[in-house]
Each structure stands twice: as C-alpha cells, then as structure tokens.
Amino acid sequence: MSTLPTLFIPHGGGPCFFMDWDPPDTWAHMADYLSRVPEEVGAQPKALVVISGHWEEEVVTIQNNRAPPLLYDYYGFPPSTYQIKFPAPGNPEVAARIAALLDAAGIAWRYDRDRGFDHGVFIPLKVAFPNADIPIVQVSLLASMDPAEHIRLGQALAPLRDEGVLILGSGMTYHNMRTLMASMRGRANGRNADPGSERFDAWLEEVLTSAAPSARIAAMTAWAKAPSAREAHPREEHLLPLHVVVGAAGNDPGRRTLKDVVMGAAESAFRFG
C-alpha cells in the first residue's frame, strides 16, 4: 500500500449531523465533505488513528480497547442523539505500534483500556465511514497545550502512514463558542463569516498550502501570533489536532479540501500528501 495522506477534518458541533437545525442546511456542506473522505483517501485504511479536540491528558494517552463504547459528551441535545450507534472496533495491535513509535521518539505515554470514543470521533466518522468497519485507535492531546509537543507527536506517528493507517486530526479551525452562539441566536449572519474567522482562515491556508515544510512548522508553533488567532481559538484544544497532522505530514504539500461558513465562522479542512 502506498503512503496514505493525513487529514484534518472538522467535526461540527455536538451531534450536529444527526439532528434538525434551523436553517436546515446549516451543516450540509460539512457533512457532504465528510461523506467524501473515503474517496479522498483512496485505498481503505487498515485502521484509523484519531486525535480529537475532546481528550486531553498529562501524558500522551493511547486508547487500548477492542470494543470502545461511545461517550455522549455533549449536553442539551435531543434524546435521539444519545441513541446514536457507531460500533467501530478498537485495535490493540495498532495501539502497541503507537506506543513503540512514541518510545522511539522519547515521548512519554500510557494506555487507557476503558475510555470510549468521544463525539469528536464518532460523530464525524459516522458520516465518513458509516459502516463502522475500520478499527479506530484514539490518541489524546496533551494538557500542556504546547503546539511544539503536538507537532512532535505527529512526527512520531508519521511512519503509520506507510503501514496502511490513516492519521486524522478532528477539531475545528474556528472555535470561539461565544461568537458562534451569538451568530446562532442572530441567525441572519449564519452564512456571513465573522471577519476575524476569515483572517485566521486565510492565514491557515497560506501557511499550510504555500509555506515550505520548515516554515510551516515554525508558523504553526507560533500560531498564537497569527491574525485574529485568539479570537478564533480562545482555548486551542480544537486547533491542536491540526498540529499533530502537520507533524505527521513531514514534507508533503498541503491543500485545503473544504472551505465552509457555519454559524458565522469560516471552517476549513486540510489534507497533506
């Protein structure tokens, strides 16, 4: 199998793809993008390694569970969204391979044999891989929120791409909940992007698709200096999965594969390789 790409995908808001919204097409463009992820990847991966914006630990933590449950870690949504099923298996063998790669890179790690898939995993992947037939291993973010450490994590995971494993970062390129909820209440601006979100999105596109790999890493390490960076991410947990993907990308060029405007914010997806 040839080297797989590595992707950063948006996972939406809560169980957004599986409930009614006003307007009805609020998440339609993003859902359509997610449904096309398998054809973008090409060959079916033997496993997915997913880094979600909804799991943080003091050291890198690797899910090691043959049948992970689902964590319905969202609140105040319709009862039906707490009945969503996504019975994708885990893969302890891939978990062990991740542990070996982290050992080789000198990165501290531990296993978690109980934790299930959070909604940053099962909500977008139920759209992308509805048959739930590809094993998934989730890997945590670091509570340090250090961008360089997350790039280094991605660099350590990169050999998986040559082993039939798809590395996915699941987050959002804009995640200022105050702005998003204000837009939702106003509704009128739902398809007009907040200027700050456009500035940050334009910076991301320039850095990820045009900069040389070394400059890309330097810029993402110093991401907080970007235009409207802290307006886009008052807290960076939804951006850091992108740092892992950038690390795993190595020298591969990047391209933006989705540009959307949802709840008044520009949201993008990126592919490397």
Image (cartoon, rainbow, N blue to C red):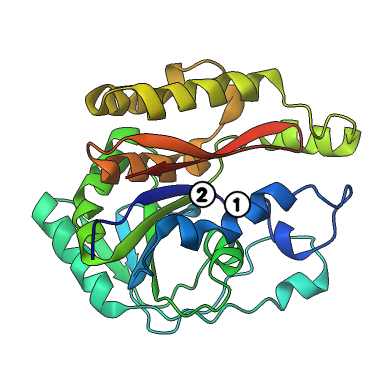
Q: Nearer the viewer, residue 109 or 245?
A: 245
CA gap, disc 2 and disc 1: 9 Å
Q: Amino acid at mark 1?
A: Tyr
- Position of residue 217 relative to residue 103, above or below, is above
Per the image, the residue denoted by label 1 is 33
Question: Where is mark 2, residue-wise?
Answer: 9
Residue furthest out toward the left: 104
Residue 215 image position (x, y, % from top left):
27, 21
Q: Amino acid at mark 2?
A: Ile
SS category of the residue bearing label 2: strand
Q: Residue at x 71, y 60 (%)?
A: 17
SS assignment at label 1: helix
User: Going by the image, does 33 lie left or right of 19?
Assistant: left
Residue drawn at 58 percent across, 18 percent down: 199
Q: Rate crowding at label 1 as few (under 14), some (14 to 19) or many (20 or more) other CA atoms within 10 Å.
A: some
Q: Kindly identify which numbered label has been placed on residue 227.
A: none
